């Protein structure tokens, strides 16, 4: 099998990239010293996390001259995500750390005054009728980044680059920021998006690089449909996983978090096998797949080996982002060894996860944060994992439930006036959302606004917003909850719990500014496919990623 060389310096999920390359019929040979770069023909620089972290590591290990020499020699080079950013002279993310300087200028940060940052999701890479490694105007690619090179028409082109752009923020009245999604010149290709996470469209780009076809045709004029708009509405399929009474890991689904059948025997509801279902939803067009190990608070990390296996096997066939949650916290193993949340997360990233989701531990950390007068000590799971892997890799899963009060000053918590008063005699019209831990088993004196603001300060990159009252009810998302949380943070929010039909997805995207919507039972019970939901959204004029084979 032909070989491609990949730099082995990076923290994060490179397993998916290796899987994607292998699926295309190539093998990966790891480059572990600067000297080995010289023996590479095709070289890939993957990148996740901070610009400064990535460039300092490359620099201190002595890689930068070797990479420059590879590029100058005319041999194929591809940079991905921070691997693209490394081509520039620097980034405001880490102003003191220089980049490779192949392209003049400095990266800046997306403006978060009018939109969520990081920019997470499927966006265009529009090369304006020029051939650029099989990028297609109608396709969407998966991006996850806070920093970008702002596109100025003609600037990079004047230096010989062919450029593809994306636009973020165009869906609101402020207009969008146009950024560089991919650049190529001669032997060099770099993508801000992750081709290995961009489904069929991304695999085409990788193939075009590996076969050399992309370099041969670069810049030629191509006819094609008009490019579509910016960021799409993300639809996520979620799989709650736990061992059933026979000890097999199954996908289950609760009603307000109760996953046991109401019938005799009271078994754990079994809705299918995790790896098979994940593949099915990928093939239906799911934009992401999330696994939640819902009984992890009982287990030790070593007992999570089956979850690692699920991730490994899923990442061989599913080329969209994978999130894993459950049990990510500092813990002590059976033999007394301390295992940090960071170590557990690392196991998951190495097995193919792109993001980890933290539930109970985030609540405890937030309580400590407020207890210490809003001070950060750098030692929480969220801080440690986001420092090592970037904040885009850390999701906080929130399990709130409504607590009704007669008037706002009846509690110290952030209340809303609700259109759905309590069912009690008092018909209370105000409520706050209490955070819970251990899968809803314990309710804490912390409200959802306090939680999301604390975890944003700690470096979480995204909120997975469940709602115990709505979970499994098929009655639609809790729009009031989503609006309260969206107005409290700048990071993206995934709406979850209650999806029962495609109209509910349309409603949550139209009536809130949620960044993504997640469904579980609706897909597991085969009431609707992911494709049906997305086709419906498209029919209603919402931007979605089209289904590609
Ligand atoms: O606390 O860090 O160990 O993480 C545990 C994780 O497991 C948390 O993310 C928590 O949300 C989840 N979890 C724990 N118990 C349950 C349960 O159901 N008994 N599942 C549970 C939460 C939420 C979504 C669900 C949506 C949509 N499930 O995954 O799929 O509510 O459902 P729907 O579309 O069918 O309404 P830690």
Image (cartoon, rainbow, N blue to C red):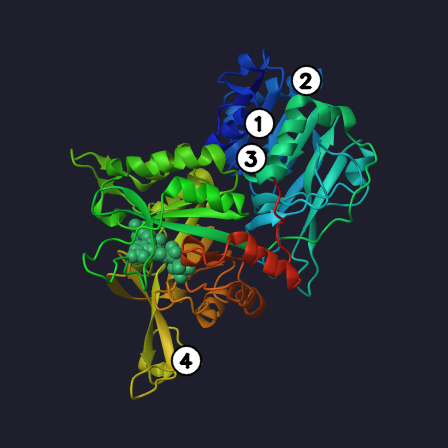
Q: Is residue 323 left or right of residue 112?
A: left
- Residue with the mark numbered 3: 196
- From the top left corner, tell me how far across and down residue 162 is, in percent: 77, 35
Instruction: Check if mark 4's residue and mark 2's residue have beta carbons within 8 Å.
Output: no
Q: Closer to the camera: disc 4 or disc 2?
A: 4
- Element on which disc 3 rests: helix
- From the top left corner, tell me how far across and down residue 153 is, in percent: 80, 45
- From the top left corner, tell me how far across and down residue 398 is, in percent: 37, 59
- The Cα–Cα distance between marks 2 and 3, rounded to whole angstroms, is 22 Å
Image quarter for ligand 1 equals: bottom left
Q: Residue at x 35, y 84 (%)?
A: 428
- From the top left corner, tell me how far across and down residue 148 is, in percent: 63, 44
The tag earlier along the polypeptide, 4 or 3, is 3
- The Cα–Cα distance between marks 1 and 3, rounded to whole angstroms, is 13 Å
Query: Looking at the rendered structure, which numbered label has been put on residue 75?
Result: 2
- The Cα–Cα distance between marks 2 and 1, rounded to whole angstroms, is 13 Å
Q: Closer to the camera: disc 4 or disc 1?
A: 4
Q: Is residue 304 left or right of residue 71?
A: left
Binning the other alpha carbons within 10 Å of mark 3 as few (below 14), some (14 to 19) or many (20 upward) gives many
The extreme bottom residue here reads: 425
Front residue of 461/500: it is 500
- Residue with the mark numbered 4: 420
The tag earlier along the polypeptide, 2 or 3, is 2
Query: Looking at the rendered structure, which numbered label has been put on residue 45?
Result: 1
Front residue of 108/509: it is 509
């Amino acid at each position: 099998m032909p070989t491609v060389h990949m730099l082995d310096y990076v923290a994060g999920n490179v397993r998916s990239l290796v899987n994607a390359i292998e699926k295309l019929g190539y093998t990966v040979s790891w480059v572990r010293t600067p000297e080995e770069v010289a023996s590479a023909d095709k070289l890939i620089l993957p990148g996740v996390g901070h610009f400064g972290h990535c460039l300092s590591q490359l620099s201190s290990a002595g890689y930068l001259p070797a990479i420059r020499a590879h590029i100058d020699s005319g041999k194929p080079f591809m940079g991905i995500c921070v691997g693209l950013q490394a081509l520039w002279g620097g980034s405001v993310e880490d102003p003191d750390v220089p980049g490779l300087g192949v392209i003049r200028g400095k990266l800046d940060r997306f403006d978060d005054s009018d939109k969520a940052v990081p920019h997470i999701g499927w966006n265009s890479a529009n090369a304006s009728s020029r051939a650029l490694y099989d990028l297609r105007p109608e396709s969407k690619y998966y991006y996850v980044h806070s920093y970008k090179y702002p596109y100025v028409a003609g600037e990079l082109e004047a230096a010989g680059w062919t450029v593809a752009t994306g636009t973020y923020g165009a869906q609101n009245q402020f207009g969008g920021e146009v950024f560089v999604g991919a650049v190529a010149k001669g032997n060099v290709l770099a993508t801000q998006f992750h081709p290995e996470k961009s489904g069929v469209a991304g695999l085409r780009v990788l193939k075009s690089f590996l076969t050399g076809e992309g370099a041969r045709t670069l810049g030629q004029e191509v006819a094609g449909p008009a490019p579509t708009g910016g960021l799409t509405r993300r639809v996520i399929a979620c799989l709650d996983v736990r061992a059933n009474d026979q000890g097999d890991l199954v996908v289950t689904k609760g009603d307000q978090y109760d996953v046991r059948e109401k019938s005799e025997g009271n078994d754990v509801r079994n809705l299918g096998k995790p790896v098979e279902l994940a593949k099915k939803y990928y093939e239906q067009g799911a934009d992401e797949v999330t696994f939640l190990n819902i009984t992890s608070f009982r287990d030790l990390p070593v007992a999570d080996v089956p979850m690692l296996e699920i991730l490994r096997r899923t990442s061989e066939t599913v080329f969209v982002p994978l999130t894993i949650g459950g049990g990510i916290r500092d813990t002590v193993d059976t033999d007394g060894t301390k295992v940090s949340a960071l170590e557990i997360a690392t196991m998951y990233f190495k097995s193919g996860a792109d993001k980890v989701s933290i539930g109970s531990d985030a609540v405890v950390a937030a309580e400590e944060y407020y207890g210490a007068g809003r001070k950060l000590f750098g030692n929480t799971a969220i801080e440690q994992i986001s420092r090592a892997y970037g904040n885009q890799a850390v999701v906080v899963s929130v399990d709130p439930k409504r607590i009704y009060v007669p008037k706002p000053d009846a509690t110290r918590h952030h209340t809303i006036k609700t259109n759905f008063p309590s069912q009690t005699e008092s018909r209370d019209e105000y409520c706050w959302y209490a955070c819970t831990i251990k899968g809803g088993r314990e309710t804490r004196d912390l409200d959802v606004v306090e939680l999301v603001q604390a975890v944003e300060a700690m470096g979480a990159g995204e909120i997975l917003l469940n709602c115990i009252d709505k979970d499994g009810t098929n009655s639609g998302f809790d729009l009031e909850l989503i609006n309260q949380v969206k107005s409290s943070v700048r990071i993206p929010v995934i709406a979850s719990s209650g999806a029962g039909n495609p109209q509910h997805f349309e409603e949550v995207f139209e009536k809130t500014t949620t960044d993504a919507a997640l469904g579980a039972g609706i897909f597991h019970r085969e009431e609707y496919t992911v494709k049906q939901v997305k086709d419906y959204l498209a029919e209603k004029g919402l931007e979605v990623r089209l289904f590609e084979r």
